[in-house]
Every structure is written in C-alpha cells, then in structure tokens.
Image (spheres, grey):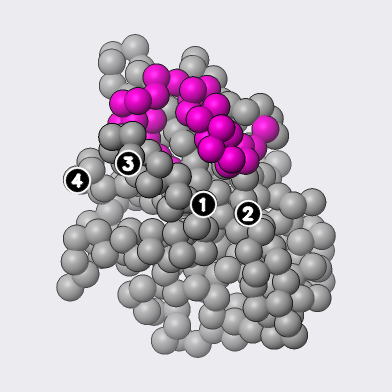
Amino acid sequence: MTSRGELSDRLWEDFEQSNPHASRIRRLLADRGDQVVNDHIGLRTYGDARISVDVLAQPFLGEGYVAADIYVFEHKNLYVRHYEHPDPSRPKMVISALDLDAFSFAFQDTVRGLIDQLDRASLDRSDLPVAGRLWDLTRRQYVLLANESEYAAWVAAFGFCANHFTVALDALRSFDSLEALAAFLQEQGFGVNVQGGEIKGLPDAYLEQCLTLADPVPVMFADGSLDVPGCYYEFLQRHPLSFGELFQEVETDSTDRISQRTDPL
C-alpha cells in the first residue's frame, strides 16, 4: 500500500534535486519563519491514450485523490484536469496533456515513436508520475519538438515528473502580497518571469501567480548532453469568493500564461 504522501514526497525530492533554486528559496522562506505549503503540483504528458491524463492519474487515485474539474485550452492545444484529496492539507495534482493532432506529421511521428518504446509494465507501474524519462531521445528529436512546442520538448526531455510546485501565499506570514514576494526573490538573486506581467492573473478573477524563471539544466540524450530549460517554482494567491471561501479552481487566463512558463523560444 502506498503510504501517506509518498508520491508527492518523491515528486518534491526529484524536483529539488534537478532544480536547486527551489530548495534555496524554500530554505530562505523557512529562515524567515514562513510555513511552506504546497497548493498544487503540476505534471505534463501527451494526449495519447497510452499515457493520457487518466493513466498518469491512476497512482494518485490509489492514494485517495478524486478527479475534479476539466479545462480545455484550444489555443494552447491543452487538456487539463485537477485532482483533489479529501485531506485538505494534501496538494492538488494538476495534470495536463498536449493535443498531438494539432501539430505536424513529423512532430506526431516523433512523439509517438517515443511512446512506442514503452512496454506494458512501464505503463502499469504504480510510480509512473515519478518515473522520469522512459524512452531514448536524441538532441535532434528534442530540437524538432521544441521548434513546434516547448511543452512537447519538455516532456520528451524529462518524462514523468513534476513540472512545477506551487507555494500558497496565504501560508507565508512574512509577505502580504505577491508583489512583496517577487521583490524579495529578486533581491535574493532569483529571476522572476515577466511574460504577461510580473504578477499574472487578477484579484477579480480570484487567482494570481508569480513564477520563477526556469533555469537551464544539463540533460543527457542518446547522442550527448544539452542544456535545456528545466522547471519553475510558482507562488499563488487565491482570493475569497463572495461567500468567503477561497477560490479553488484552475483559472483559465492565468493557466494559459502558466503553460508558456518554460518557453525558451
């Protein structure tokens, strides 16, 4: 039986190992006396039935998560679903998938060729969300995918792992706004993404985000190493609805901007 929080713990262990800036930020916040609470964890996959959102979600369902809302972003060719746990202290899981049919035949053939390398045992494993890259990939294939979709290239390079972790601002008692947090991060030498604005989203849409830049990390391919954009750390402020409870959904406009977060092109 999977122990409490095992997958989310393993997702974080892998995430901080390949994204040391996240560990440094977490330590800085802890030194200020702040409690770091994960609002949600983002994962990515392809829109192929063999590794669909539903497939990647199965291990989380085994931990007690339940499926919540579905979002379709046609202009980004993304299908997204988020999952919640009955224990509100557990982070949401937000799993997205890229619609492959929206891209060129060469692109589709490349992605499906990667998935063809997976056997049934790989697809059925209970730790699939933390399995990493399970296929061989060349630098040329990575560049081909990156020319059409940063999202596809990222999944090809890193496989199954967390794309981002998200810290809940309301648990950070030493900051009263995302603007103050963004200023602190920059004072400490961390890059903050300004695409679409330093603070993304609006209070009247009940959700605002601040995102770190994705640091390049060395990735080993079948024909050598290449530095590619890795993951980002997100900070999120949920605003209360008219009846006082915090907004809990994935807000459409802000999510659209998040999907571009690691775009190197």
The mark lying in front, picked from 3 and 4, is 3
Q: In the drawing, what numbered circle is on residue 21?
A: 1
Q: Are marks 1 and 3 in contact (CB under 8 Å)?
A: no
Please state which of residues 138 and 174 is positioned toward the viewer in this rendering. 174
Sequence-wise, the earlier of marks 4 and 2 is 4
Q: Residue at x 42, y 69 (%)?
A: 130
- Check disc 3: other Cα within 10 Å, few if <14, some if 14-19, many if 20+: few
Q: Do the residues labelled 2 and 1 touch (CB within 8 Å)?
A: yes
Q: Which residue is drawn at 59% across and 82% down?
A: 135
Separation of marks 3 and 4 at Cα, in angstroms: 23 Å
Task: Say if the magenta span includes residue 177.
Answer: yes
| Label 3: element kind | helix
| Residue 224 position by quadrant | bottom right
On the rendered structure, is 49 left or right of 103? left
Q: What residue type is labelled 4?
A: Asp
Q: Provide the residue designation for mark 2.
A: 215
Q: Earlier in the sequence, mark 2 or mark 1?
A: 1
Residue lying at 50% horizontally and 87% vertically, measured from the top left: 119
Residue at numbered disc 4: 87
State the residue position of label 3. Answer: 30
Q: How crowded is mark 2: few (under 14 residues within 10 Å), some or many (20 or more)?
A: some
Q: Under tag 1, what secondary structure?
A: helix
Q: Pinpoint residue 14: horizontal percent, then vertical percent.
A: 43, 66
Kind of residue at disc 1:
His
Q: Is residue 9 above or below residue 86?
A: below
Q: What element carries label 4?
A: loop
Please tell me how crowded label 4 is: few (under 14), some (14-19), or many (20+) other residues with Cα within 10 Å: few
